[in-house]
Amino acid sequence: MKKILILLFSLLVVFAGGVFLFLRRTPSLETKFVQPDIVEAPEASDSAGFEEISDSENTNIRLRQPGVSAMLAAPRQVFQTFNNCGPATLSMALSWYGISVSQDELALKMRPYQVEGGDNDDKTIFTSEFSGWAETYGLKSVSRVNGTIDLLKLFTANEIPVVVKTWLKPGEDIGHFRFFRGFDEAKQVVIVDDSYHGPNRRVSYYDFLSMWQPFNYAYIILYPAEKEELVRTILGGEGDESVAWKGALERAKEEEKLDSQNIYPVFNQATAHFQLGEDEESVADFVRVEERLPRRMLWYQIEPVLAYQKLGEFERVILVTDKILENGNRAFSELYQIRGEMYLERGDREKAREQFELAIKYNSHFEPARTSLDGLSAR
């Protein structure tokens, strides 16, 4: 009887494990994501995996094709201090090129207003800012949207580091930068070095895309000047920022069709519309998902706010920015700048000055506010 009970218990454990694995199975990528063919397939390559391409100036470019796996050499691992993934990840990326700059030094430039414990300190570094700071250390840098895993593979195979903007974890709403190290096509994983989770982190394609999608698949390329033509060749038409945003918009529309309950493709349409100068369409898409967005969504992408500003909707600008500033993210200089400009447009110089001063309080390097204050003083 005892043996029978043990056998039944074992069968129950096996059955429960099978059910658990079944429920946790990863859906196919095609059910949620669109992966456009941004990178053209090569016509032919040599035995080493290289393809000869002539650019617009008839210069021959040797482009290595990704193959089934590729892995960059490791940068220096930097574990971030609180809310410091941007400076920490940039420190790692610079170290890959032999440039030694600590995350603390970078943080004083990129997010100078810091609070121990992170409450109401500067939490927002846009990809364009990240790219700009990288260039101050002698590198070239480009930030784009509408990235794909295939594009990341191609950069990696050609020894060009890429930083991606994602959520910290699937299902969370904390923005995070990651250094893209490589991929393994057979195992369907990407490999990233992470200032929070550590180096050599393997992430399934599905989880990676789930964390990347909310940022319109944003990525940052860092490279030396001598690789300029190679980078242009890889980017192709997406080297034009407007082309990338148009591609992102069409992709988001297609992804919305895949899952009508997925809020991120709709929000991605809102950000893309703004970047393409379509402000009314931007706010219309934002309104469609505003009440369902994670509370930190507008911490990292403020295009809907900028669209309201361009449309002159003062009350909406103040209402939306109040929600952000009063929700644990008071040190947001860009929002104070927008508010100041709106008050100034209404003729309220004192309130405008107050907002510009707050912008500088929370980021002493924020030049737009200094320019605005100089303009007020000159009147």
Image (cartoon, rainbow, N blue to C red):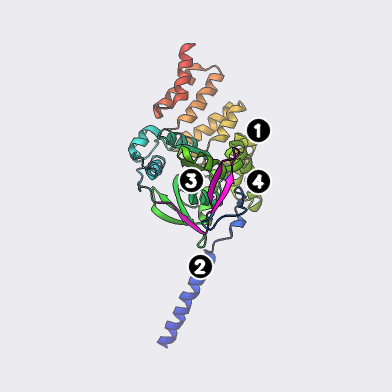
Query: For mark 3, what is the residue?
Result: 164
- Tell me if I can see residue 270 in this picture: no
Residue 192 percent location from the top left of the image: 44, 52
Q: Quadrant of the N terminus?
A: bottom left
Which is more N-terminal, label 2 or label 4? 2
Q: CA distance from mark 3 to mark 2?
A: 30 Å
Which is more N-terminal, label 4 or label 1? 4
Q: Which residues are magenta?
A: 50-73
Query: For mark 4, what is the residue?
Result: 253
Task: Judge whether 313 appears above or below 142 on screen.
Answer: above
Give the side of residue 39 with respect to residue 79, left or right: right
Which label belongs to residue 280? Answer: 1
Query: For mark 2, what is the residue?
Result: 21
**Hey, what amino acid is under mark 4?**
Lys
- Tell me if I can see residue 363 in this picture: yes
Q: Name the element at disc 4.
A: helix
For label 3, count other residues whose C-alpha is less than 10 Å away and answer few (under 14), some (14-19) or many (20+).
many
Which is more N-terminal, label 1 or label 3? 3
Q: Name the element at disc 3.
A: strand
Q: Nearer the viewer, mark 4 or mark 2?
A: 4
The residue nearer to you, when weighing 105 against 339, is 105
Which is more N-terminal, label 4 or label 3? 3
**Hey, what amino acid is under mark 3?**
Val
